[in-house]
Image: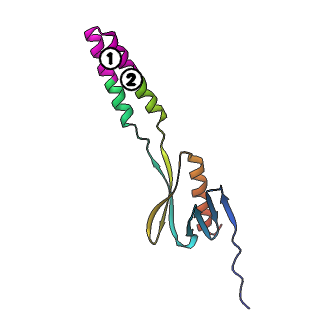
Amino acid sequence: MYAQPPQEQMIYQDGQVTVTTARFVVGPTLYPIRGITAVQPIVIPAERGAAVIACLGGGVILLLGIATRSLGFGAFGVLLGLIGVGLWMAAHPVYVVRVWTAGGQVDAVSSNELVRIQTIVSALHRATMGM
């Protein structure tokens, strides 16, 4: 008699990502769980270069406005500084599920939601460990 293979069990599903004991599916891409050698959450920091430039430029223009007693320069400097602050606050890091297979590393899923990425990584760890 032959032993039946274990049934595939659902571990996580959110509409875009599915993790079972046999498969990791992201959109149209399927990764067999047996082919995954490592999984890691990655944080890509927010891009804030434009915000820094806008704030610094606004500060310089504001100082020029004060030095020349120009209300227009001063107001434009303040406005540019406020735009920089807004850009800074609007920038968010991107969280990624990085998967290693025999073919190399792949950034399989990205999201602005850390909890979602942590949940997917946890589900993949459970799947690769055989639940």
Classify 29 as above or below 41: below
Task: Specify start and end residues of the magenta stretch as a single range.
Answer: 58-79
The residue pinned by badge 1 equals 62
Which scheme is used to colour this image of the protein?
rainbow
In the rendered view of the protein, which quadrant contains the N terminus?
bottom right
The residue pinned by badge 2 equals 81
In reply to whether residue 53 is colored magenta, the answer given is no
Q: Which of 17 and 101 is in front in this view?
A: 17
Q: Which residue is drawn at 30% across and 19% down?
A: 61
Classify 12 as above or below 77: below
In the rendered view of the protein, which quadrant contains the C terminus?
bottom right
Q: Residue at x 44, y 71 (%)?
A: 103
Q: Which residue lies furthest to the left in this view?
A: 68
Classify 115 as above or below 27: above
The amino acid marked with disc number 1 is Leu
User: Which mark is first along the chain, 1 or 2?
Assistant: 1
Q: How far apart are marks 2 and 1 (CA)?
A: 9 Å
Q: Which residue lies furthest to the top in this view?
A: 69
- Residue 131's disc is none
Label 2 close to label 1 by CB (< 8 Å): yes
Classify 34 as above or below 28: below
User: Where is residue 41 drawn, in percent x and y?
Assistant: 51, 54
User: Where is residue 101 drawn, in percent x and y?
Assistant: 48, 69
Choose top left, top right, bottom left or bottom right for residue 52: top left
User: Where is residue 24 drawn, in percent x and y?
Assistant: 59, 65
Within 10 Å of the Cα at label 1, are there few (<14), some (14-19), or many (20+) other Cα atoms? many
Choose top left, top right, bottom left or bottom right for residue 14: bottom right
The amino acid marked with disc number 2 is Gly
Q: Residue furthest front?
A: 72
Q: What element carries label 1?
A: helix
